[in-house]
Image (cartoon, rainbow, N blue to C red):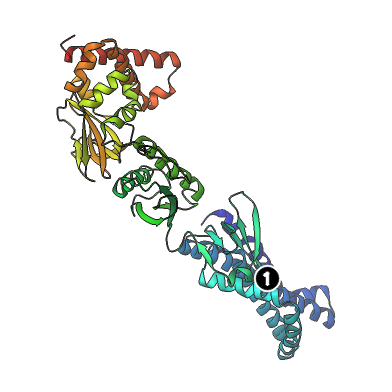
Amino acid sequence: MNSTKLSKLALPFLLTVVFAVALFIDNQWVHNLKLTKLQFLIIDKVLKTGMWLSSAFLFARFLNVIVLDTWVTKRIEGRVPTFIHNMLGVIILTIAIMCVTYFVFGQSVAGIWATSGVIGIVLGFALRSMIADIFTGLAINIEQTYRIGEWIVLESGLEGCVEEINWRTTSIRTPQNNIVRVPNSNIGIKPILNYTYPDNKSRFEVLISLDFSIETKRATRVLLAGAKSVTSQYGFYEHPEPKVIVKNINEIGVEYEIQYWINAWKGISPPVARHRVLASMLEQLRHAGISIAYPKQDIYHEKMPSRHLDSATGEDCVPLLRKIELFKPLDESELAMLGESITREHYQAGGVVITAGDEGDSMFIVVEGLLEVFVDVFGDGNELRVGSVKPGQFLGEKSLLTGVNRSATAKAATDAIMYKITRENMMPILHQRVEVLETISLIIAERELRNSSIFEKASKELRASETSQLSNQFLVKMKDLFSNF
C-alpha cells in the first residue's frame, strides 16, 4: 500500500485519538478548571459526540481506502465508483448520529424513525425521479451491468467510455472527448451494448456488393484475403478468424458480409478498424481486377464486353502484370510476351509455395488471396511469421534473378491464385534488352532496403549510396547467372 493512501487515514485517526485522550482526562480538567456541573456536562457530551463522529469518520475512511480502493479494486480490476463510497459514508454517518442520539443524549430513536418515515413519504413523491436514479445506480453497481473504464452503447446511439457512476448519473466520455451525463434511471430501463462483456472480443461486419458475373468462390477468396491481411495489426484478433458469407442478393449484385473481430475501443476504435478492413479489401479487389457493383443500365448492340479482369484469361494477364512494380521497365510487347509464357497456379489454404533453403529458378506474383511468410529467426527450427504477401506483391525474385537459395518459407493463408515466372520465361526479354537488368536490380535493391529501420533513419545521401551498392551487387550476380550476356 502506498503512502498516499495511508495519508488519507491520518486526519480521522488524529481526531479520534484527540477525542479519546480528552475523554480519558476530562475529570482532571474539571478539577483544575473548577467547572460547574452544567459546564462539565456540556463538555462531556461534546467530547462523546466528537468521539462517535470521529470514530465513524475513521471507520468510513478505512473502508474506502483499505477495502474498496485496495482490496475490491484488485478483485474487480477496475475503479470502484464514487457512488459506492458516498453511499457507504452516508450509512456510517447515519448510524453514528443514531448512536449519539441514544447513548450520548439518552433520546429514543424510535420517534426519529417514525418522523423520518412521514417525511420520507412526502419527499418520495416529490423526488421520485431522483430516487429512481439513485436506486438504479445502486442496482447497476450490484449487477455490474457496466463498470468504469468499459465502452458501452446506449439505445439512443450514444457510445463512449464510462468515466463515473455517481448518485444520479453516469458520466460517459464520447469518442469526441466530450462528457455526457445520463440519468441512471434512463439507462436502467433500456438495452445496453457493452463492448467489454463477457470479454474484450467484439465482432463487426462490413458489406460489399459485387457483380453477378463474379464467381462466388473467387469473390470469397479475394475478400477473405483482404480481411485476413489486417488481423496482424494492433487491436485486431486473428482468432476467431475473419469470415466471408453471402449476405443477400440485391438489384445491383451479390452482397457479401465480411466478419472480423477487434478489441473495440480498448485496442482500436470501430471506425478506424472498419476503414482498415475496407481499404485492404479494396486494394485486393483492385489487384484482382474486380470493381464494386453499382447501379447501371447498359444497352449493347454487340456482344457484351467483360466488366472485370480475370487472371484465368490470357488477354487480362497483361493488365494485371502491368501493376507489378518489378515489371515497370517492360513495354507492352514485352509484357505480352511474358504473359503468354507464364503459368497460373492455384494453392489451397495452408499450401506451401516456397520453402526456406531450397534452390529456386522461379518467382511468384500474388494475383488473388494472401500468403504468409515464415523465417527461422533464432535458428532452432521453429519458424515465426514475419510478414504477408498481398495481391500485387511478389516473392522469390532473388532466387530467380541471382540464383541464391530461398531465404524464407511462404504458405497460403487463404486460397490463392498466383502467376509463376521461371528463368526461361525471363530469358527472351532480358536477352533483347540488357539494360532492363540494371533497372530491375535497382528495384530489387530498393525493395530489400525498404523494410530496414536503420535505412529509414539514414540520410538521403546514405540511402542513395546503400541502394546503389546493393543494386550493383545484384546486377553482377544477375549477369553471371544469365551467362548469355
Q: Position of residue 168 (x, y in %)?
A: 66, 68
Q: In this view of the protein, which residue sits in the foreground, 447 or 484?
A: 484
The residue located at (48%, 51%) in the rendering is: 266
Q: Disc 1 marks which residue?
A: 54
Is 87 on the left or on the right of 429, as rendered? right
Circle 1 residues within 10 Å: few <14, some 14–19, many ≥20: many
Establish if 356 lies above or below 433.
below
Q: In this view of the protein, which residue sits in the foreground, 312 or 380?
A: 312
Quarter holding the C terminus is top left
- Is residue 165 in view from this perspective? yes
Q: In this view of the protein, which residue sits in the foreground, 232 or 361?
A: 361
Q: Position of residue 469 (x, y in %)?
A: 32, 13
The residue located at (34%, 13%) in the rendering is: 468
- As helix, strand or loop, the secondary structure at mark 1 comes to helix
Q: Where is residue 223 in the image (x, y as percent from the top left)?
A: 36, 46
Q: Position of residue 378 (x, y in %)?
A: 23, 35
Quarter of image, res 88 = bottom right
Quarter of image, res 140 = bottom right
Establish if 116 lies above or below 183.
below
Q: Which amino acid does label 1 sit on?
A: Ser
- Is residue 24 in view from this perspective? no
Q: In this view of the protein, which residue sits in the foreground, 262 or 134?
A: 262
Is 26 on the left or on the right of 250, as rendered? right
Establish if 373 lies above or below 137.
above
Q: How many marks?
A: 1
Residue farthest top in this picture: 485
